[in-house]
Image (cartoon, rainbow, N blue to C red):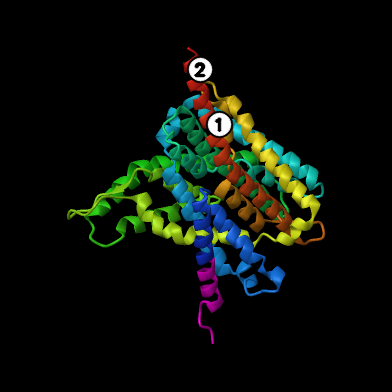
Amino acid sequence: MNHGLDPAVLIGVAVMLVAAKLAGEVFERVRQPAVLGELLAGVLLGNLVIFGFTRIEPLKTSETIAALAELGVIILLFEVGLESDLRQMMEVGWSSLLVAFLGVVAPFLLGWMVSAYFLPDAATLTHIFIGATLCATSVGITARVFRDLGKLATREARIILGAAVIDDVLGLLILAVVSGAIQAAAVGGTLSAFDVGWIAAKSIAFLIASIAIGHSLIPRLLRGAGRLETRGVLLTLAISFCLFLAWAAAEVGLAPIVGAFAAGLILDEVHFKPTGGRVERDLHDLLQPVSTVLVPIFFVLMGLKVDLRLFARVDILGFAAALTVAAIVGKQICALGVVERDVNRLAIGLGMIPRGEVGLIFAGIGASLMLPLTNGAREPVVNAATFGAIVIMVIITTLITPLALKWSLEKKSSDKRKGKGKE
């Protein structure tokens, strides 16, 4: 008799959430992003099999947990969109655009070259995809460092945050093109230059159209939700809109996260103004309980897929180290794009380093996309060994950024004080 949901999934999700929160708390206490704790909690749980404990293994392939994790990613990109200020991004102008452009092109090419060197037998699309995972910048980690130091309003912070948002958009566009090429290869086809251009144009058109229509229409509709007495109306409508755009993105051949990100950009200024004297609530605050539960499932699942036994192989550790160097050097090159004087270019290069959640999202998508082999079999674009190397790169770039960025900003302030003292 079928009782519906497998009880193993219920206890599995409970264990994943508790482990994520405990590990996240440890990392928060040492002033590191909780997301790293959630990721490492997954790594620890997933490798208990080394000690003969196999009860966690079914969670790695559970379709239910994979679906919850995908919902978590969609909510996460919705949040990233909500935190991204389009107007501020446009105000910082050429510096942000040039920093963003160089911050995508340089890591992309370096990642491609590193992959081609370490994985000579892999398909070209695999090299391109690994290059794409190095493109994005984690906005949240850098923003937190600037906020902690009270420097969120500085020119450097605005250039970095503007460029990081543009990086995410460009990274999503690259992801759309590469995913399209992989899906074409999976059915025996290839993408022409026209096809690549068409996917890119479609992606840009989708973002522009959804933002243009949404900005004029959706906030007005949601502000009117304050007249409704039903509890949670704004949150429900906002998430429904996010899911609708995620579905629309998938329908036009893009990753659902592109739609979720666009939904966040559209709703970034929506406040809920309830009637009857109740307190005004920001949409981001309302979304917190949902993301607090769903998002960690994604990061723990990503950690579960990391097999520590692979790191006994020197070649994989070498690949991880080379990817990390490419990720760091690629973002230092972007500091050359700063056109203004008296701006801390070193801080801008360092602030663009962390890949955080976006790099993991790309790697997770790569692990789910399949490429055909000559013998008729299929293999994931990002296999287990490569996935582990990407996770190491994400962890290192995320850990070193707060320390390096604080040092750079404090050094600049100290140099300015010394300069004034000499005068």
Please name the residue shown 58% across and 42% down the image: 354
Q: Magenta segment range?
A: 1-16
The picture places residue 97, in percent across and down from the top left corner, at 53, 29
- Local crowd size for mark 1, using a 10 Å CA cut-off: few (<14), some (14–19), many (≥20): some
281 shown above or below 57: above
Given contact means CB atoms under 8 Å apart, are the residues at marks 2 and 1 in contact?
no
Label ID, residue 408: 1
Depth check, front residue: 210 or 301: 301
- Local crowd size for mark 2, using a 10 Å CA cut-off: few (<14), some (14–19), many (≥20): few
Q: Main secondary structure of the magenta part?
A: helix
Q: Secondary structure at mark 2?
A: helix
Please name the residue shown 27% across and 54% down the image: 225
Q: Is residue 244 magenta?
A: no
Q: Is residue 72 left or right of residue 192?
A: left
- In front: label 2 or label 1: 2
The picture places residue 61, in percent across and down from the top left corner, at 63, 68
Q: Residue furthest top?
A: 423
Residue type at mark 2 is Gly
The picture places residue 218, in percent across and down from the top left corner, at 34, 47
Please name the residue shown 48% across and 36% down the image: 161
Q: Quadrant of residue 8?
A: bottom right
Residue type at mark 1 is Ser
Q: Is residue 12 magenta?
A: yes
